Amino acid sequence: MKLTLLLATLPLLAVSAAETTGWLNWRGPLHTGASLETGLPDKCEPGSELWTYDIHGAGTPVIANGKLYAFGFYGEVGEDVREALLCLDAVTGKKLWEVRYTDYLSDVVYSRYGIGAPAIDPETGNVYLQFSNGHSVAYTGDGKLLWEHSLMEDFGRLTFPNGRSGAPAIYEHLVIFHCVTANWGGDGPAADRFYAFDKLTGELVWASTPGIVPVDSSFALPVFGKLAGRDVFYAGTGCGHVVCIDANTGKPLWRFRLSQGGVNAQVLLLGDDKLVAVHGTENTDASTAGRMVCLKMPTGYPAELITLGKEAELWRNDEITAFSSSPTLADGKIYSTVSTGSLLCVDAATGKTLWSEKLAPDQIHASPTFADGKLYVPMFDGTFHILKPGPDKAERLFETKYENNLLGAPAIWAGKVYLFSKDKLHCFGSKEGKYVGVDPAPKPAPGEIAGLQVVPAEFAIKAGESVDFKVYGLDANGRRVKEVKAESWATFIPPTAKVQSTVDANFEGSKLKAKPDAKLSAGAFKVTANGLTATTRGRVVAGYGYSADFEAIELSMKNEFDPAEAVNFPPLPWLGARLKWHVLEKDGSKVLGNRLDNILFQRTTNFFGSSDMSGYTLEGDVMTDGTRRIMSSVGFVNQRYLVALVGNAQILEISSNHDRLKQSVKFPIKPNTWYRLKTTVKSNPDGSGTVFAKAWPRGTDEPAEWTIETPVKHLHPKGSPAVFAFSPQSQKRVYIDNIKLTKP
């Protein structure tokens, strides 16, 4: 993990909670998709808007103190497609500021961008966003960057073709991001996880893995509540569960298996002990798809993670099939659109469907909003409906059709309705409206210190770098009391660790320093203070001057799928590599070879540096197994550009996102033949640049000229080095050796 933090902006954060109000998250002040405002429009006819703004969007804008923040994208095809965090005057639509980001190394296809929303901190007015590829940012309300993370490069965040990123959740001093990662060590296996960062500094406070192996991504937003005096949140996961997690520590408390697929819709809380969740994939106990369930939640704080069974169900409704549309709650009724294009009204006490209204052929992503006694309902086919719900039917007040799909939920603020269509942002209503919200819940005073928490909870440094730690005392309910002074630091090896490893760095006070010659390493440390202990973990990652020939790695293991083959793991600090690569013997040397035992890993990118690196040259020996008919692809990532020898196509290719940037030249590739692959990236003052690559048979003279030079209009300014493999259907291996990372 390498964090970009602009300390000079921190004095700007002194804003009181009372000064920041509005529709601060995509489901509004009640976290249910409902508003307390009245006097809202009965019609939202295209052409009658207060204003529109041309930007593609598939989510929900958020509004605070007259400023609107939107997540969208510009461009149609190719490199010019860029995602944006946009700030407008919420009354006039005038642009106040904007930042644009270019996608990198993601699987997002077509124009499936902008499927998510920012979130605004009610205490500071800062705005947070996770882009489609996991790049996560924190900005002040005036557009100054506070910090940013590449969750892909820092924590092994995976990407998916659907591009859904959801929205961050803000809770007191934390901002929480939800994603699927394949990190390192015990977090190396892919899992649906929650990462909580300090909202001001961007340092990781905790990470949580509450579920099992995911079958899908999930972008469900956490909903906060109380459990036995503790602060907790509830959310769906990509492994089909609804989970409960301690908001202050990340400890998983309970989970309930709702579906065979991912749970993407936001849950609804009915008081302190009931929860409603919905999904749209195959059920766990039937061949049908989709269900809404009301759970009776535990009231005690469990010592260990517990799994709830069917006995926890108070009711279920099998008529609800909502894959990614979230329901809304008002006056004891649950309103949900379903995949077949209908709007259903469900009694929250019994789960009985009270009425159903067919609105469109189908539905995906978009969610209804309840306000002023009306339902504002966008549908995937571009129709927009306003209905007045009654006890046994809904009165249709208005219906219109937009030229493009509607994929987000309407936001409500100060007498106005904001709606994203796939081609622009619309604002309807009154310029003179007044915002009506809810008073913030009082914060309980923390108790005596009963536990410790180390921040950052995870770190990554290069040789010659250091990291400063803070130790916080927590009360018996996990709430932060104050910072405490560390009495001692010691190496810690968890009893469950499969690999006993230590970090090649030493403490000076609460600063951990890696010497200039520190080796790649990973491990954990334990701090002691006030008679209590806590742990942190981290890595020394590759920096400029790093090389790897794998000869020092003892082949002490047997490949479980080929016992005749002696193997061992790749370096522990490489993100997500231990399940995807082996070190093995090949052609008289120890080399890196990708594993073929799991078809889910037929394509893999594994980072071994830090995301703040730039201007380096990366090279190494590469080879693909196979025949003239079936070959794999092998390569490196340099500064977020993939440079690969594509065996089946007989090309040398440079790409980032394949739909955004891809260029290649013919290159003859023979199977079972070693090649030397070399790449570098050069930037220009105007933000453009060029990606260079060359390849030649190993053992021959290096060509004087680059084999391919790819000009880039919006150059990625930095990025971690990585290895890459693609073995279609997990049939043919690739091999890598003699890696060298240098900087002029």
Image (spheres, rainbow, N blue to C red):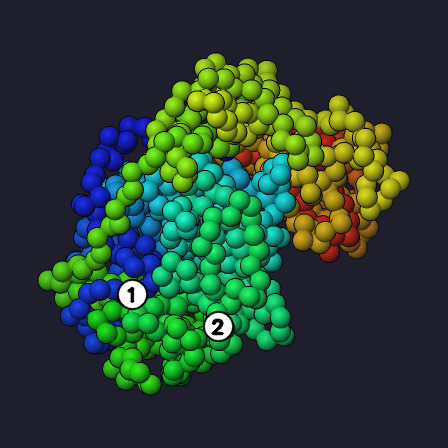
Q: Which residue carries the number 1 mark? A: 34
Q: Is residue 394 visible?
A: yes
Q: Secondary structure at mark 1?
A: loop
Residue 233 in the image: above or below residue 382: above
Query: Splitting the image into 4 quarters, where does residue 174 fall?
Result: top left
User: Which circle marks residue 60 in the picture?
Assistant: none
Amino acid on which disc 2 is placed: Trp
Q: What x and y, as percent, mark residue 536? A: 52, 29
**Tally of numbered tags:** 2
Residue 646 in the image: above or below residue 674: below
Q: Is residue 716 visible?
A: no
Q: CA distance from mark 2 to mark 1?
A: 23 Å
Local crowd size for mark 1, using a 10 Å CA cut-off: few (<14), some (14–19), many (≥20): many
Local crowd size for mark 2, using a 10 Å CA cut-off: few (<14), some (14–19), many (≥20): some
Q: Secondary structure at mark 2?
A: strand
Amino acid on which disc 1 is placed: Ala
Q: Earlier in the sequence, mark 2 or mark 1?
A: 1
Q: What x and y, as percent, mark residue 630? A: 78, 54
The residue under the point 28% across, 31% down is: 10
Q: Which residue carries the number 2 mark? A: 315
Residue 288 in the image: above or below residue 69: below
Residue 196 in the image: above or below residue 353: above
